[in-house]
């Protein structure tokens, strides 16, 4: 879909109006003194330091993000406490409520009439914003935008994004790195740590100071439509090790880490962007499977945990009346006091920030509405509300709930303390901020970093470790490709992916093998008859999630059988989840690469040119 909805946080692009937004935001320089004046007034005893918006990339005062302990002096704890209480006391109730909002700037503009963005941001004064691929077209634009956004804020903003690596990335000019399942296939948590560090470095260079990663879900359901390659695998202990490593890497880059999606989204068969998933398991199952990585993340000092919009009726049986059809609907985890407070806070002992998944996703928006969902999420125990469809209306609803006695003001204060503590830790607040780098210097530094190619080199190394071979004749069929001029036919449904694989094969034949190769791409229908193929032709079927389409899987199986009968050398290159292996278990050769990033495809092609099988191991159990 060319213009996906922004309620789909993992496949969204900007629909338009970006230039308009930049022009409007430019006028905030006139209002900057107002915001700074408010901030100075809130902090009469503290120097301003570097000012708002320059905390990205500053190393946290506490290594590893672990909770306060013996390593922190009593004096430091007292200083932090006094600073946060002084800040809190200088904020009105409305300002405290707004600190709990993590908004989509487009939603702010739309709610305010589109042309009043600067004024709307200053009136709303949210705690943070979330940016998408359309907001980040190039280095200069995003750095300029981030500086301008910070100038609208009395208290510096979280400027966040989803940069997981693999299929969920927001930087069109940067390496997509590897998805988590590819990293899991290396068998080395160090690969997750390095990926976390590199992703953190990327974002810090752009003054993006919060990344919604890592995914801590266990992909135990092959039919999961939304997690899949975003998970490290299906083994709870292994996923836990990789989650911990990623958190350490992100902390090493000076950024917070956000584990998601609690209480676990890996065994669902419904995408919460478009529906309301359900996990009908009891406590023992969650403790032994889904919560293992979250416990590990908490022990590692994860800064925030994101809730999932999934129902868990055996743990939270409470219901509400659905706005969609008027029927009772079980509360999802995001709106569940039992799960967010009873389990995450009290049972698992998490003391950091709880952030909701996007509240404009259909699992929430269809059944509960914007204002009601915001109030219910706070009652449940959420600290930050991500992307309420109408941010100002959500803030007003929370204020009304406090005024009516449905919510205690102390409950709001608890959340704001956690948010401010996290901002202070990562250098956003005055007493921990560093002096800002001049904008042009920041742009040049970011350009030099991204042009260096270091991230791509890291991604290539990890992808090569991840590539996984299967089949009945792996060693006898490698190297499959030699650059000896023979004809190679690529088969698959995704023409764009085939063209990218073709370019990688041609480049590898020219550089690595020192020869030439003839490559052409065909659809399965065009490749259905192999009887007229020249002698010596090699076929590579590029598969992507065959298990989701039984007809395609049967077509591929029949084709491989016919190719074997006619003596055609053939292999599969799996570029989706590795469950294609279960659909094609007996073919002579298959290579799974766990994604379609440039690094994934290069690794797959390199494996086809190599005499030795790649060393990657399946990170999931086959159905």
Image (cartoon, rainbow, N blue to C red):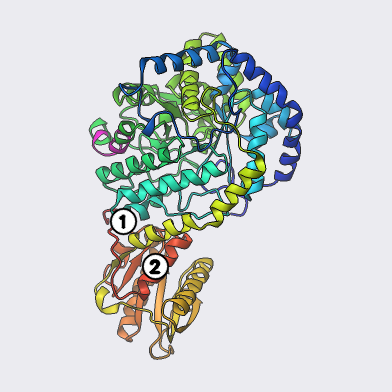
- x, y (%) of residue 246? 37, 43
Q: Quadrant of residue 312?
A: top left
Q: Tag 1, which secondary structure?
A: helix
- Compared to residue 548, the image places residue 366 above or below, namely above
Distance from disc 1 to disc 2, alpha carbons, whole Å, reads 14 Å
- x, y (%) of residue 606? 39, 70
Q: Quadrant of residue 482?
A: bottom left
Residue nearest the viewer, comparing 468 with 396: 468
**On the rendered image, what quadrant is the C terminus found in?**
bottom left
Q: Is residue 135 visible?
A: no
**On the rendered image, what quadrant is the N terminus found in?**
bottom right
- x, y (%) of residue 390? 62, 29
- Compared to residue 399, the image places residue 317 above or below, namely below
| Total number of numbered discs in the rendering | 2
Question: Which residue is identified by label 2?
Answer: 604
- x, y (%) of residue 188? 29, 52
Q: Tag 2, which secondary structure?
A: helix
Question: Which residue is identified by label 1?
Answer: 186
Q: Which residues are magenta?
A: 287-295
Residue nearest the viewer, comparing 56 with 480: 56
Q: Is residue 444 magenta?
A: no
**Label 2: few (<14), some (14–19) or many (≥20) C-alpha neighbours in 10 Å:** many
- Compared to residue 449, the image places residue 44 above or below, namely above
């Amino acid at each position: 879909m060319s213009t996906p909805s922004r309620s789909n946080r993992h496949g969204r692009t900007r629909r338009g109006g970006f230039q308009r937004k930049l022009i409007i935001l430019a006028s905030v320089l006139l209002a900057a003194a107002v915001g700074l004046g408010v901030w100075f007034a809130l902090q009469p005893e503290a120097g301003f330091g570097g000012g708002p918006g320059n905390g990205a990339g500053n190393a946290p005062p506490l290594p590893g993000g672990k909770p306060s302990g013996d390593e922190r002096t009593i004096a430091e704890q007292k200083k932090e406490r006094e600073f946060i209480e002084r800040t809190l006391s200088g904020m009105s109730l409305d300002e405290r409520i707004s600190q709990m909002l993590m908004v989509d700037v487009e939603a702010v503009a739309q709610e305010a009439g589109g042309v009043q963005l600067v004024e709307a941001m200053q009136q709303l004064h949210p705690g943070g914003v979330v940016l998408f691929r359309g907001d980040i077209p190039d280095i200069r634009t995003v750095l300029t935008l981030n500086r301008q956004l910070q100038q609208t804020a009395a208290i510096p903003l979280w400027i966040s994004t989803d940069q997981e690596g693999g299929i969920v990335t927001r930087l069109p000019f940067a390496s997509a790195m590897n998805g988590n399942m590819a990293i899991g296939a290396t068998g080395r948590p160090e690969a997750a740590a390095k990926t976390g560090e590199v992703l953190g470095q990327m974002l810090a260079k752009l003054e993006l100071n919060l990344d919604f990663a890592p995914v801590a879900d266990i992909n135990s359901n092959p039919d999961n439509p939304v997690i899949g390659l975003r998970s490290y695998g299906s083994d709870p202990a292994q996923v836990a090790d990789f989650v911990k490593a990623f958190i350490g890497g992100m902390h090493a880059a000076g950024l917070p880490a956000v584990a998601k999606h609690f209480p676990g989204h890996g065994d669902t068969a419904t995408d919460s962007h478009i529906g309301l998933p359900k996990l009908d398991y009891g406590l023992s199952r969650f403790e032994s499977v889904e919560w293992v990585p979250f416990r590990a993340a908490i022990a590692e000092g994860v800064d925030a945990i994101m809730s999932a919009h999934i129902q868990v009726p055996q743990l939270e049986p409470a219901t509400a009346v659905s706005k969609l059809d008027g029927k009772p609907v079980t509360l999802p985890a995001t709106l569940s006091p039992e799960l967010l407070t009873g389990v995450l806070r009290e049972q698992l002992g998490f003391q950091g920030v709880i952030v909701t998944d996007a509240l404009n996703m259909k699992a929430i928006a269809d059944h509960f509405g914007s204002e009601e969902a915001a109030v219910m999420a706070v009652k449940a125990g959420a600290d930050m509300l991500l992307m309420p469809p109408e941010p100002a209306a959500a803030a007003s609803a929370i204020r009304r709930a406090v005024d009516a006695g449905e919510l205690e003001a102390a409950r709001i204060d608890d959340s704001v303390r956690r948010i401010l503590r996290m901002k202070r830790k990562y250098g956003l607040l005055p007493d921990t901020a560093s002096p800002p780098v001049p904008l042009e210097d920041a742009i040049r530094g970011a350009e030099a970093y991204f042009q260096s190619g270091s991230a791509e080199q890291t991604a290539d190394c990890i992808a090569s470790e991840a590539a996984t071979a299967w089949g009945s004749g792996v060693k006898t069929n490698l190297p499959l490709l030699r650059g000896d001029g023979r004809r190679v036919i690529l088969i698959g449904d995704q023409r764009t992916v085939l063209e990218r694989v073709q370019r990688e094969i041609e480049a590898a034949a020219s550089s690595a093998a020192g020869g030439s190769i003839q490559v052409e791409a065909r659809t399965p229908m065009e490749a259905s008859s192999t009887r007229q193929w020249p002698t010596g032709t090699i076929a590579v079927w590029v598969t992507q999630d065959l298990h989701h389409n039984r007809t395609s899987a049967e077509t591929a199986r029949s084709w491989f059988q016919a190719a074997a009968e006619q003596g055609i050398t053939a292999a599969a290159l799996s570029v989706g989840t590795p469950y294609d292996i279960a659909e094609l278990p007996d073919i002579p050769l298959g290579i799974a690469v766990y994604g379609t990033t440039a690094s994934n495809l290069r690794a797959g092609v390199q494996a086809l040119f190599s005499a030795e099988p790649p060393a990657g191991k399946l990170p999931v159990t086959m159905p």
